[in-house]
Each structure stands twice: as C-alpha cells, then as structure tokens.
C-alpha cells in the first residue's frame, strides 16, 4: 500500500494537471464570481479564518468583500507591521494553513515588509495581498499619493520580490484565477511568503468559479523512485554499521514543511533517541520517554551534549544551522557521521541528493528501520526535566524562574518567547504534551512577539488549543512601543482574546548588555507603569483584564498557584521584577560566543 504522503503527492499532481487543463479550456458556464471573492474562496479552502491588515484607499473595495465574507473575519490591526507579525504567528500555530495580511499600496506594504522578511527567513507561509491603483492608473502613471513621484509603480513589487518566493501581479481577469492559484500553491508547498497585487478595479471583475472545484496542489513533487530507493538503501547500511545506535536531531523545517506526522511515526516505530535544536522545540513531545532535550552546540547542557556528540550516527531532520540555533556554529557533529533530511534534498555524509524530500522519504525509511527498534531501545536517554534550584533569598532569578514556570504550563498551551532572555531561558525546561512553542530565533526582530501572539491566539481558538502565554522583557516591550507593536494588546482586547503576558522587568536590554556594554547607558531604558498598560490600550472600565506586579519568588508562587489566574478567563499582564544583570545560562554562553565573533572594539 502506498504511504499516505505518496498518495497525497499523487493527488496533488493530479489536481495540478486538472488546473492546467482548466486554464487551457478557458471560460465555461460556471457561476461568475468577483476576482476578490475568488481569492477569498481560495484562502477559505486553505483554512484561513482571520485576515490581518489595515484599511487603505487602494484596498477598501476589496475590504467590503472581506467584511461580508461568512468564514473569514477581518481582524484589523493598528499598523501593517503588526499585521504581518500576526499573520506569521497565525501560520505557525495553524499547521497546514497560511497566514494572510492585506495592506494598501506603497506606504502600507513597505511597513509590513519587515514582518514578511522575517516570515521568509524562518520559512512561514504568509500571503501578502496589496491593494494597488487601478489598471488604467498603472498604465497612465499619474503622480498619485503613495507613489514615489517618478512614475515607478513597480518599485514596491521589486522590493517584495526580495522577500517572497512567488508573486502574482494581477493585470487582467483572464489569468487572475490561475495566477492566484499558482502563488497560493507555492506558499503552501515552499513554506514561504508570497505576494499578490490586487488593482482596485480588478477586485470586482467577474470570472468563472469553475477552478474552485479543484483543490489547490499542496504537496511537494514526487521523489524520483530510483534515487529515493538508493538513498534509503544507503541510510540503512549506515544504521547497520552503527549497530542501531543512531539518534535523531529534529529542527525547524520539520515543523515548517509539514513533516511532523512522519517524524512522530518514525520515532515511535524505531524508538531511536531524539533531540531537538532550539528552532525545533515542541516538534517532539517533550514528555516522551525517548526525548532527551535541546542541542545547541557548545552551549548545550553537558549530559545532552555528550549523548548527541558521541552518537555513532546522527539522523538530522529539517536542520537550520543559524548562529543562535547552533550555539554560534559550534556543532561538534562530523559530517561523516551525519545524514541530513530536508524539505527538498537529502545529504548522506558528503553526498548530496537534490529533489529527494523528507516528507515522502521518511515513511519509506521508517518501514526499513523498524527492525532496529530493539537495539535502539537499549540506548539510554537522560530524562529531560526541569530542576528548581534551592537559592538563598527571595529575588526572582532566571535560574529559578524558568523551571518554576514549567510547572505552570499545561498541555496544548501556546508559548511565545521574545528574542533574548525569554527565548534562551525557556530552552532548558520541558514543555507539556501537545504544546506549541513560538520564537523568532533566526530573524530575531525585536517587536515580533506581541503581534505574533495576536495571530497565535486566534489560531489557537481555531485549533482548540489551550492558553496563549507570552514572555517578553521590558526592553523588548519598549522597542515594541517604538515600532507600535505594543498597540496589538488593544486588538487582543477588542477581539476578546485572553493571553497571559509576563513582562520581565530587568531595567533594560539584557541580551545587548551581555553582547556588549553591560554598564553603558545605551542599554538602559525608562521604567514604565506596566500594570497600567492594558487600561490605557482599551480596558477603560477594568472588566476585560487584570494586571499584577510580583517582586519575589513567594509572590510569583502565590500568583501561579491561584486557580483563577491560571484559568486565564481574562487577558492578564504580569510584571516580574528581576535583577538588572541576571540572564539565563544559555544566553550568557551564546552572548560570549557572539561577542567574540563580532569583535567589538574594546
């Protein structure tokens, strides 16, 4: 019987051919729909229920169609950058779907571009729709507002090409449906952002709805069967030579390229020990008895580092070796002991096999490796646990805070960690079963998490997940204020969302302090009254939220043990007072490596 992934790939190829045929056939007798309605119908088919963005005069007509749509809700953000962050967070949580953001021409789309670039960097499927001037205006090129004043109406499209994997510059009704289908399919299969321009007049042009009957292709092309068979044979030989003593190292692309089911099936049938890189955190159930924790090169916990680096063979799945994801490139895993499976290629030791993707390869590999489960089971995996240290004093340290927080987490929680103390501190503690972890470890845009939390919380509702919990430093949140992403707390209140937000108040930019300039004034910030923030941003009567300040371990313990607080029935903000120069172990180690690499002047 064909593996499920192969069946899906065959179905995808069939649907692709059907769409090609419909393009060749041209118009038919199917009911006509607006181009804008066609685009929304395709987004609905992809599972989109929330559209993020900001109204602008070049997208207002299309927005009428959005607001009247039965299944897609117009969220409405405070600015376009926030909207792009929210679409990113939505797509990360809602596996198999995409995030969608709508901006206006020029000023709006450029504002969103940082968020789109981050989604491209971290391989997140986001659809960026830009409402643009009418086809007649594009042809005659008047000096419209939002233009550069020199007739270059394509300048923003050229910018978008740098940060999206596919673009549809809609220019007529005859090809609009096929172009929309092409880029949406690219978005899902390639796992990166795409860009669609929607002229004001074309949004209401009538086209056939016939293509909507054929599902969009959503699977990568089939692997070459002969090459795939050879690759599997070679991998099996290496496992035999290692006498079944292989470990699996899972990373971000396993999540981004929809290979989680295949990974989990491999792990449970073979019983190989499994570890994750930071960007792959939550790809594997961290309560699973064969899970050993997070590997980050030289800054890894010693007991984990020894097990990974001494393995006879490493099966790396979906690896993304960025600096913060690899301990500043300090992996001590020789190529001669490594097999790499990626979305569109495979590498065995020093040999590359292009176009052999992991989604179809893994199930066939699993079938061949099941026989090694008895030997694999004998390889000891140290339990991945969080130990709360016994510290003198009542000050909230990072060494105490993160293990304590791990006791607060529940299955199916969505946990968002800001770049810096939060994203490093949480690495050393296990998350509950079926939880989802979000962090922007490669792009690292300070300002991403608040907008992303909005999208994540909306997606969590769609997916019947539990609480959404954000960890962010006071320095990061003030940067959010400069970028205006903190405003999305207001949108969360308006949409009835109830995240728990922990603001780690340590008087400034802690990650920068450890990189360089611990006592420099440029790493200091003005303290704010954080507990007044939600009132200012919309909870005027105090009925929609609650805010707290905790100054000690005892106060935090008391709050975390409060059942009403833990139930998250309203939006909550917790200001956590922490020492100025305290930081998680992993951040201190990473900062030391990064500082040496950056060679700051002394």
Image (cartoon, rainbow, N blue to C red):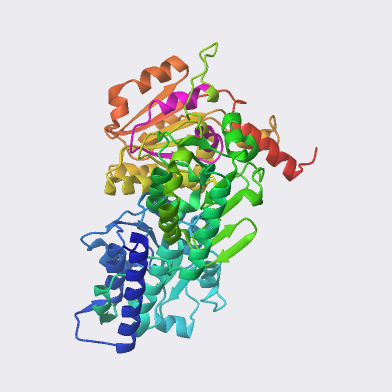
Q: Could you tell whether 307 is left or right of 369 in the image?
A: right
Tell whether 187 sits left or right of 539.
Answer: right
Q: Position of residue 88 (x, y in %)?
A: 43, 53
In the displayed structure, would residue 475 be above or below residue 454? Answer: above
Q: Is residue 522 visible?
A: no
Residue 71, located in which quarter of the rendered image?
A: bottom left
**Residue 448 higher or lower than 507, as above or below:** below
Query: Which residue sits at x=30%, y=68%?
Result: 42
Residue at x 55% of width, y 36% of height: 424
179, 450: nearer the viewer:
179
Q: Is residue 426 magenta?
A: yes
**430 magenta-colored:** no
Q: Quadrant of the C terminus?
A: top right
Q: With respect to residue 564, does 111 lie above or below?
A: below
**Horizontal side of residue 196 vs 248, given as left or right:** left
Q: Position of residue 145 (x, y in %)?
A: 47, 70
Name the outermost residue toward the right: 602
* Residue 160 picture location, percent across and down: 52, 67
Q: Which residues are magenta?
A: 400-427
Percent position of residue 340, x then y: 56, 54
- Residue 22 appears in which quarter of the rendering? bottom left
């Amino acid at each position: 019987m064909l593996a499920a992934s192969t069946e899906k790939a065959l179905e995808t190829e069939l649907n692709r051919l059907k769409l090609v045929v419909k393009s060749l056939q041209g118009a038919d007798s199917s009911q006509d729909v607006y181009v804008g309605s066609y685009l929304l119908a395709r987004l609905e088919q992809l599972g989109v229920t929330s559209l993020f963005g900001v109204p602008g005069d070049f997208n207002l007509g299309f927005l009428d169609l959005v607001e009247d749509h039965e299944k897609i809700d117009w969220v409405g953000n405070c600015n376009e950058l926030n909207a792009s962050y929210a679409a990113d967070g939505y797509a990360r949580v809602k596996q198999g779907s995409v995030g969608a953001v709508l901006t206006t021409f020029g000023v709006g789309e450029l504002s969103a571009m940082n968020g789109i670039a981050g989604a491209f960097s971290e391989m997140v499927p986001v659809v960026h729709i830009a409402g643009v001037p009418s086809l007649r205006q594009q042809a005659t090129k008047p000096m419209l507002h939002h233009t550069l004043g020199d007739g270059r109406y394509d300048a923003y499209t050229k910018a978008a090409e740098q940060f999206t994997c596919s673009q549809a510059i809609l220019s007529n009704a005859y090809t609009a449906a096929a172009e929309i289908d092409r880029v949406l399919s690219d978005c899902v299969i390639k796992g990166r952002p795409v860009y669609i321009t929607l002229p004001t007049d074309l949004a209401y042009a009538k086209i056939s709805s016939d293509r909507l009957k054929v599902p969009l292709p959503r699977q990568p092309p089939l692997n070459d069967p002969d090459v795939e068979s050879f690759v599997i044979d070679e991998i099996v030989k290496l496992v035999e030579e290692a006498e079944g003593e292989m470990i699996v190292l899972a990373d971000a692309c396993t999540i981004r390229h929809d290979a989680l089911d295949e990974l989990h099936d491999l792990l449970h049938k073979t019983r190989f020990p499994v570890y994750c890189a930071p960007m792959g955190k939550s790809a594997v159930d961290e309560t699973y008895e064969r899970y050993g924790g997070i590997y980050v090169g030289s800054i890894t916990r010693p007991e984990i580092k020894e097990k990974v680096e001494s393995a006879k063979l490493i099966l790396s799945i979906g690896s993304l070796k960025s600096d913060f994801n690899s301990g500043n490139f300090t992996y001590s895993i020789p190529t001669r002991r490594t097999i790499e499976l990626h979305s569109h290629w495979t590498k065995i030791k020093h040999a590359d096999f292009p176009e052999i993707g992991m989604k179809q390869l893994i199930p066939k590999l699993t079938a061949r490796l099941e026989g090694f489960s008895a030997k694999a089971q004998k390889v000891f995996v140290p339990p991945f646990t969080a130990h709360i240290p016994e510290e003198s004093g009542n000050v909230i340290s990072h060494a105490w805070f993160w293990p304590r927080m791990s006791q607060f987490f529940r299955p199916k929680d969505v946990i968002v960690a800001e770049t810096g103390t939060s994203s490093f501190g949480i690495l050393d503690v296990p998350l509950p079963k079926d939880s989802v972890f979000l962090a922007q470890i490669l792009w690292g845009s300070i300002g991403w998490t608040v907008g992303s939390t909005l999208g994540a919380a909306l997606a969590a509702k769609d997916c019947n997940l539990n609480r959404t919990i954000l960890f962010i430093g006071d320095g990061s949140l003030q940067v959010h204020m400069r970028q205006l992403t903190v405003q999305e707390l207001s949108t969360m209140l308006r949409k009835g969302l109830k995240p728990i937000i922990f603001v780690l108040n340590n008087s400034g930019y802690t990650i920068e302090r450890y990189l360089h300039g611990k006592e420099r004034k440029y790493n200091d910030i003005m303290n704010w009254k954080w507990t007044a923030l939600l009132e200012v941003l919309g909870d005027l009567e105090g009925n929609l939220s609650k805010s707290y300040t905790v100054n000690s371990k005892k106060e935090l313990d008391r709050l975390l043990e409060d059942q009403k607080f833990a139930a998250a029935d309203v939006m909550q903000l917790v200001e956590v007072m922490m020492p100025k120069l305290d930081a998680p172990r992993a951040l201190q180690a990473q900062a030391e490596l990064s500082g040496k690499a950056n060679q700051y002047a002394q």
